[in-house]
Amino acid sequence: MTRTTPNPAIRLEEITPGNFEAAIGIRVRPDQEVAVSPVMQSLAEAYVHPAGVAWPRLIVDGDRPVGFLMAFLDIDWRGDGTDFRSGLWRLNIAAEEQGRGYGRFAVESVAGEIRSRGGSQCHVTYHPGTDGPQDFYLGLGFRPTGETSGSQTVAVLNLT
Protein backbone atom coordinates (compact mmCIF):
# COMPACT_ATOMS: atom_id res chain seq x y z
CA MET A 1 0.00 0.00 0.00
CA THR A 2 1.54 3.29 -1.09
CA ARG A 3 0.94 6.29 1.11
CA THR A 4 -1.06 8.93 -0.70
CA THR A 5 -2.75 12.00 0.65
CA PRO A 6 -5.75 14.00 -0.54
CA ASN A 7 -3.43 17.04 -0.40
CA PRO A 8 -0.02 17.84 1.04
CA ALA A 9 -1.47 19.56 4.11
CA ILE A 10 -2.96 16.39 5.60
CA ARG A 11 -1.18 15.03 8.65
CA LEU A 12 -1.58 13.18 11.93
CA GLU A 13 -1.18 14.97 15.25
CA GLU A 14 -0.72 13.48 18.70
CA ILE A 15 -3.60 14.29 21.01
CA THR A 16 -2.55 17.17 23.27
CA PRO A 17 -4.29 19.65 25.55
CA GLY A 18 -4.19 22.04 22.58
CA ASN A 19 -6.20 19.83 20.22
CA PHE A 20 -8.21 17.72 22.70
CA GLU A 21 -11.43 19.70 22.16
CA ALA A 22 -11.07 19.41 18.37
CA ALA A 23 -10.54 15.66 18.70
CA ILE A 24 -13.59 15.02 20.87
CA GLY A 25 -15.64 17.24 18.54
CA ILE A 26 -15.26 14.77 15.65
CA ARG A 27 -18.69 13.31 14.87
CA VAL A 28 -19.50 10.62 12.32
CA ARG A 29 -22.85 10.48 10.51
CA PRO A 30 -25.75 9.56 12.81
CA ASP A 31 -26.28 6.24 10.99
CA GLN A 32 -22.63 5.32 11.71
CA GLU A 33 -22.77 5.93 15.47
CA VAL A 34 -23.76 2.30 16.14
CA ALA A 35 -20.66 1.07 14.30
CA VAL A 36 -17.91 3.18 15.92
CA SER A 37 -17.38 4.47 19.44
CA PRO A 38 -17.05 8.20 20.02
CA VAL A 39 -13.58 9.74 20.26
CA MET A 40 -14.00 10.36 23.99
CA GLN A 41 -14.38 6.62 24.63
CA SER A 42 -11.32 5.87 22.50
CA LEU A 43 -9.22 8.35 24.47
CA ALA A 44 -10.41 6.82 27.74
CA GLU A 45 -9.47 3.36 26.47
CA ALA A 46 -6.07 4.64 25.38
CA TYR A 47 -5.50 5.96 28.89
CA VAL A 48 -6.29 2.67 30.65
CA HIS A 49 -4.13 0.44 28.43
CA PRO A 50 -0.41 -0.04 29.05
CA ALA A 51 1.79 2.69 27.59
CA GLY A 52 2.52 2.18 23.91
CA VAL A 53 -0.43 -0.11 23.12
CA ALA A 54 -2.87 2.59 21.99
CA TRP A 55 -1.81 5.10 19.32
CA PRO A 56 -4.50 7.84 19.11
CA ARG A 57 -4.10 10.57 16.48
CA LEU A 58 -6.08 13.51 15.17
CA ILE A 59 -6.30 13.71 11.37
CA VAL A 60 -5.83 17.31 10.27
CA ASP A 61 -6.07 18.87 6.83
CA GLY A 62 -4.43 22.28 6.87
CA ASP A 63 -5.92 23.77 10.03
CA ARG A 64 -9.13 21.66 9.95
CA PRO A 65 -9.58 18.58 12.13
CA VAL A 66 -11.23 16.05 9.81
CA GLY A 67 -11.00 12.76 11.69
CA PHE A 68 -9.58 10.63 14.44
CA LEU A 69 -7.86 7.28 14.39
CA MET A 70 -6.55 4.99 17.06
CA ALA A 71 -4.25 2.09 16.34
CA PHE A 72 -3.36 -0.77 18.62
CA LEU A 73 0.29 -1.76 18.59
CA ASP A 74 1.42 -5.19 19.75
CA ILE A 75 -1.69 -5.83 21.81
CA ASP A 76 -1.96 -9.22 23.51
CA TRP A 77 -4.96 -10.28 21.39
CA ARG A 78 -6.01 -13.32 23.43
CA GLY A 79 -4.62 -12.11 26.74
CA ASP A 80 -2.40 -15.16 27.15
CA GLY A 81 0.89 -13.87 25.72
CA THR A 82 0.72 -16.05 22.59
CA ASP A 83 -0.77 -13.76 19.93
CA PHE A 84 0.38 -10.15 19.61
CA ARG A 85 -1.28 -8.05 16.91
CA SER A 86 -1.31 -4.51 15.59
CA GLY A 87 -3.94 -2.68 13.60
CA LEU A 88 -6.60 -0.03 13.32
CA TRP A 89 -8.70 0.13 16.48
CA ARG A 90 -10.93 3.10 15.68
CA LEU A 91 -11.58 5.33 12.70
CA ASN A 92 -13.89 8.33 12.97
CA ILE A 93 -14.08 10.61 9.95
CA ALA A 94 -16.21 13.71 10.49
CA ALA A 95 -19.56 13.40 8.73
CA GLU A 96 -18.97 16.42 6.50
CA GLU A 97 -15.46 15.24 5.54
CA GLN A 98 -16.26 11.71 4.37
CA GLY A 99 -15.53 10.62 0.83
CA ARG A 100 -12.40 12.80 0.50
CA GLY A 101 -9.68 10.19 1.07
CA TYR A 102 -9.12 10.75 4.78
CA GLY A 103 -10.10 7.19 5.71
CA ARG A 104 -7.64 5.77 3.20
CA PHE A 105 -4.96 8.14 4.53
CA ALA A 106 -5.69 6.91 8.06
CA VAL A 107 -5.36 3.23 7.12
CA GLU A 108 -2.17 3.91 5.16
CA SER A 109 -0.75 5.85 8.11
CA VAL A 110 -1.45 3.03 10.55
CA ALA A 111 0.03 0.51 8.11
CA GLY A 112 3.13 2.70 7.82
CA GLU A 113 3.51 2.90 11.60
CA ILE A 114 3.17 -0.88 11.92
CA ARG A 115 5.76 -1.41 9.17
CA SER A 116 8.17 1.02 10.88
CA ARG A 117 7.94 -1.16 13.99
CA GLY A 118 8.71 -4.33 12.02
CA GLY A 119 5.13 -5.55 11.67
CA SER A 120 3.85 -7.36 8.60
CA GLN A 121 0.08 -7.35 9.20
CA CYS A 122 -2.54 -4.73 9.97
CA HIS A 123 -5.73 -5.98 11.64
CA VAL A 124 -9.11 -4.30 11.87
CA THR A 125 -12.50 -5.21 13.31
CA TYR A 126 -15.75 -3.90 11.92
CA HIS A 127 -19.48 -4.41 12.08
CA PRO A 128 -20.38 -6.75 9.19
CA GLY A 129 -22.91 -5.89 6.54
CA THR A 130 -23.22 -3.47 3.68
CA ASP A 131 -24.41 -0.63 5.92
CA GLY A 132 -21.09 -0.65 7.80
CA PRO A 133 -17.48 -0.07 6.72
CA GLN A 134 -17.00 -3.58 5.29
CA ASP A 135 -16.80 -2.47 1.63
CA PHE A 136 -14.32 0.28 2.55
CA TYR A 137 -11.94 -2.15 4.28
CA LEU A 138 -12.30 -4.86 1.63
CA GLY A 139 -11.60 -2.25 -1.04
CA LEU A 140 -8.31 -1.41 0.68
CA GLY A 141 -7.26 -5.07 0.60
CA PHE A 142 -8.30 -6.31 4.05
CA ARG A 143 -9.48 -9.91 4.08
CA PRO A 144 -11.70 -11.48 6.78
CA THR A 145 -9.82 -14.01 8.92
CA GLY A 146 -12.89 -16.03 9.86
CA GLU A 147 -12.61 -14.76 13.44
CA THR A 148 -14.95 -12.48 15.29
CA SER A 149 -14.35 -10.10 18.16
CA GLY A 150 -17.65 -9.77 19.94
CA SER A 151 -20.09 -9.12 17.11
CA GLN A 152 -17.42 -7.69 14.82
CA THR A 153 -15.63 -9.27 11.88
CA VAL A 154 -11.83 -9.50 12.17
CA ALA A 155 -9.92 -8.75 8.96
CA VAL A 156 -6.23 -8.49 8.11
CA LEU A 157 -4.16 -6.61 5.56
CA ASN A 158 -0.79 -8.13 4.71
CA LEU A 159 1.86 -5.42 4.60
CA THR A 160 4.62 -7.40 2.87
Image (cartoon, helix red, strand yellow):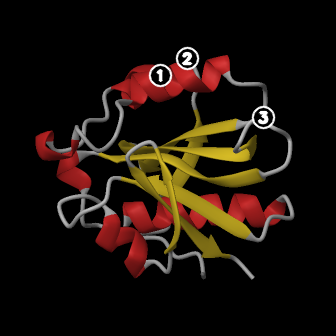
Local crowd at mark 3 within 10 Å, few (<14), some, or many (≥20)? few
Residue 70, placed above or below residue 130: above
Tag count in the figure?
3
Quadrant where the C terminus is found in the figure: bottom right
Residue depicted at 24% across the width and 66% down the height:
99
Q: Earlier in the sequence, mark 3 or mark 1?
A: 1
Label 2: which secondary element = loop
Task: Say which of 133 and 52 sits in front.
Answer: 133
**What is the x, y in percent for residue 52?**
78, 34
Place residue 30 in its image quadrant. top left
Viewer-closest of 54 and 3: 54
Q: Which mark is residue 52?
A: 3
Q: CA distance from mark 1 to mark 2?
A: 5 Å
Mark nearer the N terminus (2 vs 3): 2
Q: Is residue 18 visible?
A: no
CB-based contact (under 8 Å), mark 2 and mark 3: no
Instruction: Tell me the amino acid under the disc marked 2.
Output: Pro
Q: Nearer the viewer, mark 2 or mark 3?
A: 3
Q: Is residue 134 left or right of residue 55?
A: left
Residue 146 shows in the view: yes
Mark 1 — residue? Answer: 20
Quadrant housing residue 134: bottom left
- Distance from Cα at disc 2 to Cα at disc 3: 19 Å
**Tag 1: Cα neighbours inside 10 Å, few (<14), some, or many (≥20)?**
some
Amino acid of disc 1: Phe
Residue at numbered disc 2: 17
Mark 3: secondary structure:
loop
On the rendered structure, is 90 left or right of 65? Answer: right
Residue at (33, 53) in percent of width and height: 127
Measured in 3D between alpha carbons, the distance from the residue under mark 3 to the one under mark 1, in whole angstroms, is: 19 Å
Q: Nearer the viewer, mark 3 or mark 1?
A: 3
